[in-house]
Image (cartoon, rainbow, N blue to C red):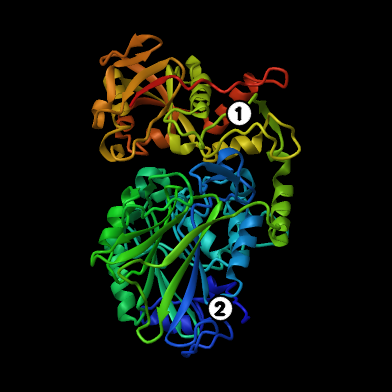
Amino acid sequence: MPARPQRRGAGRRLATGVAVLAAAAGVLTAVSPAGADTGAASDKHRPGRTVDVQLLSFNDLHGNLEPPQGSSGTVTETQADGTTKTIPAGGAEYLATSLRNARKGHEYSVTAAGGDMIGASPLMSGLFHDEPTIEALNKLDLDVTSVGNHEFDEGRAELSRMQNGGCHPKEGCYEKGKTFPGADFPYLAANVTDEKTGKPILKPYTVWQHKGVKIGFIGVTLEGTPDIVTAEGVKGLKFHDEVETINKYAKELQRKGVKSIVALIHEGGLPASPSYNYDCDNGGAGKGISGPITDIAKNITPQVDALVTGHTHQAYTCTIPDPSGTPRTVTSAASFGRLYTDTTLTYDRRTGDIVRTSVKGANAANHVVNREQPKAPDMTSLIGRWNKLAAPIANKPVGYISADINGRGSTTYESPLGDTIADAQLEALSPADKGGAQLAFMNPGGIRSDLAYKASGSEGDGVVTYGEAFTVQPFTNMMNVIDLTGSQLITALQQQVSGSNEASPKILQVSKGLTYTLDLTKSGKDRIVTDSVKLNGEAIDPAKTYRVAMNEFLAGGGDGFPAFKDGKNKLVGASDLDAFTAYLGAHSSQSTPLDPPKADRITVVK
C-alpha cells in the first residue's frame, strides 16, 4: 500500500517556495506532499480514466478531546426492526483510530472539517485557549477546515494565533520550553473580510493535490455569525452571503484550472430523524431535511461537487439538487467527534472534475466513532499531558447531584439544567447590592453539556467537579442586570419564536417564578400567549419596570433578541460560571445532593 502523503506543516509551508509564486499570481494552493508525483498516473486500485478520492470529514468538535459526558457523548442508531439503540461515541483517542483505519487502502484520501473545531470547549482545552485541540488536529492529519462562529469567540487576533502559532499574549506559554506552533492545516474564511480593506482575513480556499488529482476547498461560516458571537469577537469584521461567496470563488478556482470543488460550510440542516443512519433521501432527494442548508445547497453553483456542513450538530448524508437539478451530496457528522463521514468522490482524470450522475451526488455514509476500538496512544499521551496541567483546577468538587441533570441533551424546549442555571443567575444577582434581579434568562445555546451523575474520573458518582461545570458554561460571560419594562419583556419572549428565530425557535431558559404558555399551534409571535406570562403568580404589567439578569451575550442582543439591547441601568456582576458553581455549592452536599428540577415553568401546547 503506498504511503499516505504526510502534510504536517503544510499550513505554514504555503508561505514558501512554490506557494510564494502562486500567491503572487493570486492562487492559494496547498504544496504538493513531499515525494508526490504531480503527473497523471494510474490509481493502483482503479486503473484508467477515473480514480476514487476518499473524503473524510467531521465538524463541531468544540475541543472535545475526551469522550463527552452524558447524552453529548452518545449517538442514536436505528435498528433493522425500527427500534433505536444508544451508542457511546466520541473522544480524540477513538477519532484518531477511526480516521487512521478508514484511510487504509486509500492512496487518495483527504480529511476536511466544517468549522467550530474550537470554542465552547471543555476545561482541558478551554483553559489553555484551545491549544490542545489544535495540537490534536495536527496529529489527526486534518488537511483543511472552514472557520465556524465559535472560532471568533476570542476575536480575530486569537484566531490568527490558532493558525500561525505563538504563545498567548497575556498568559504566555503553557509548557516550559515550548512555543505553540499553530495549525498545520489552513483555516478558510472566504466570507469574512476586514471592514476597512475588504479583504478576507484568512485564506478563502486551498487546493489539495496528489498525483495529478486536484480538489479545491472553499470555506465559509454562516453569514449570521455576528448575531451569535459577542460584539468584541467580530469587531472590525464583515460577514458575507454564503452562496454568493462560494459561487465567486468557485469561478476563480475554475479559471485556475481546478474543476473539482468541495465547499466547507459552517451552516447546517435539521434531518427528520435524530438517528445518525437515517435515510435523508427517503421520499426523494433532500426530502428528509430542512433548515438553512437546504436553500443554500439549492443555490450554490453546480461547479461545486459536494458540501460538508455543520453548526446544527446534526447527522445526515443527503443529496439536494443543485441549480441544474443534479443531485449533490450534503453531509454533516453531528458534533464532538462522535461521528465521521466517509465520502467517495469519483475523479475524472481527463476532465479534472468529479463525476456526478443524475441519480446521486457521491457515495457518502456516517460512521460511529465507537469506544470499543483501541485508543490512539499519541492522543492518550496528549490528553494526559494537558490534563496534568489542568488537574489542580479541574478536579476540585463544586457540588453534588442525585441524577443526571440534562441540558444539551434535553429534547424539550425547557431543560432541567436550563432551569438550574437560570436559578443560579437569579440567586447571584437578586441581592440589592448585586443588581436586584427579579428574574433571569439563559440562552439555550450557551448550555454546552449535561451534568452527568456518573463520574468522569476518580471523583465519584454524583460529584460535580469544576471541570464539569466549566464544560456546561465555558464562555465565562459576565452577568448583567438591566431594567426592562413589562412590554419589553413580552417582546423579548415573542422574539424567541419570531423574526430571525421564527424558523428555528430559541426558547430562553427561565428562572423560578416566571411562567407562561407557548402555543405551537400558532405562528410567529402569536405562539406566546401574552396574558399567560406571570411572575410569581402575577401578570406582567406592560408599564412596570423589572430588573432582569442575563449574560452579556444576551444583553447585547445576541441570538436574535434585540429587545434586550434596549435595557437601561445596566449593572455588571460576576461571571455566569461563578454564579453556577456558587449555586451548586450552596444547594448541595454529599448527604443532600441537588435533584433535577421538574422543568415545568413553560407550558407547551402542541
Q: What number is the disc on residue 581?
A: 1
Q: x and y percent of residue 574 in the render?
A: 53, 29
Spot occupied by residue 532 in the image (x, y as percentages of width and height): 31, 15
Give the image location of residue 211, x and y in percent. Answer: 50, 85
The quadrant holding residue 390 is: top right
Label 2 sits on a secondary structure element that is loop
Q: Nearer the viewer, residue 223 or 76?
A: 76
Q: Is residue 91 visible?
A: yes
Inspect this view and state whether residue 173 appears: no
- The front one of 293 and 361 is 361
Q: Amino acid at mark 1?
A: Thr
Report the Cα–Cα distance between label 2 and label 1.
50 Å
Give the structural element (helix, strand or loop) at label 1: helix
Identify residue for label 2.
107
Who's the residue at 44% across and 55% down the image?
332
Q: Mark 2 belongs to which amino acid?
A: Glu
Taking the image as shown, residue 240 lies to the left or right of residue 231, namely left
- 490 vs 311, nearest the viewer: 311
The image shows residue 79, relative to residue 400, as above or below, that is below
Of the pair 307 and 148, the residue shown nearer to us: 307
Report the mark closest to the observer, 2 or 1: 2
Q: Quadrant of the C terminus?
A: top left
**Residue drawn at the location 52% of the way across and 47% of the way down:** 79
For disc 2, the neighbor class at 10 Å (few under 14, some 14 to 19, many from 20) is: many
Query: For residue 309, which quarter of the picture?
Result: bottom left
Does 148 appear above or below 396?
A: below
Circle number at residue 127: none
| Residue at x-position 33% and y-position 20% | 517
Q: In the current view of this chain or complex, which residue is farthest to the top? A: 538
